[in-house]
Amino acid sequence: MSEPGNRPSPTAPQQPPPRYVRDSHCGTCGAPYTALPSADAWPRTCTHCGTTAYRNPLPVAVALLPVDGPSATGLVVITRTIEPQKGGAALPGGFIDHAEDWRTAVARELREETGIEAAAQDVRLADVLSDTAGHLLVFGLLPPRPLASLPPSAPTDETSGYEILYGPRPLAFPLHTEAADAWFAGRYG
């Protein structure tokens, strides 16, 4: 029953809002995509306005920072405090911002997740890895640093701090594991 003014009664049962399905509507005109062969079909052409949409990967910049320790050289890794893979060890990294150079992104992500400063011009390309889930990671290698030159490990907005990984082990993300294993095997020079 409705109150005056055609507003629903506050005591009447309410219908849940419609479930939002990501990428189900055209980003140009807002019309729903129809006649898709599957929910994973890309690219998509809108039958209403004719715009074709693509699902391109969002590039991620990942830092490989070698650290000369007391008896071996290792890599800086962080412990994540956010999903995905909360609690897992990972190389410092994150999405490259719009109009940001990938080297600048490597240095920024290293600073944001560890407090360790690095110059973008010191970053060199180590590897670019992708998988069938649509992830594209750009691994930037920095010059080795002495352990004593690093700031103390401290929590950040997304990590509980950093540590030095002195040998290969599984990391939170398979592509991080692949790159770290390659570094420990000497494949990045």
Image: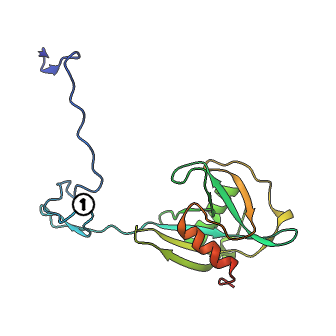
Q: Can you give x and y, in whole percent of width and height, for residue 82 in the image?
A: 56, 49
Give the side of residue 62 with respect to residue 50, left or right: right
Q: Is any part of residue 100 visible from this angle?
A: no
- In the displayed image of the protein, which residue is found farthest to the front? 169
Give the side of residue 74 with respect to residue 182, left or right: right
Q: Quadrant of residue 112?
A: bottom right
Give the side of residue 71 with respect to residue 42, left or right: right
Look at the image and name its color scheme: rainbow
Residue at 14% from the left image edge and 59% from the top image edge: 34
Q: Which secondary structure lies at badge 1?
A: loop
Q: Which residue is mark 1?
A: 39
Which image quarter is the C terminus in? bottom right
Residue at 63% from the left image edge and 79% from the top image edge: 182
Above/below status of 156 relative to 6 = below
Q: Can you give x and y, in whole percent of width and height, for residue 37 in the image?
A: 17, 66
Give the side of residue 139 with respect to residue 28, left or right: right
Above/below status of 142 relative to 18 = below
Residue at 62% from the left image edge and 47% from the top image edge: 157
Q: Can you give x and y, in whole percent of width and height, for residue 2 in the image?
A: 12, 17
Above/below status of 108 relative to 129 = above
Above/below status of 184 relative to 97 = below
Q: Quadrant of residue 89?
A: bottom right
Which image quarter is the N terminus in? top left
Residue at 80% from the left image edge and 54% from the top image edge: 152
Q: Is any part of residue 164 visible from this angle?
A: yes
Q: Type of residue at label 1?
A: Ala
Other-residue count near label 1 (Cα within 10 Å), few / some / many at <14 / 14–19 / ≥20 = few
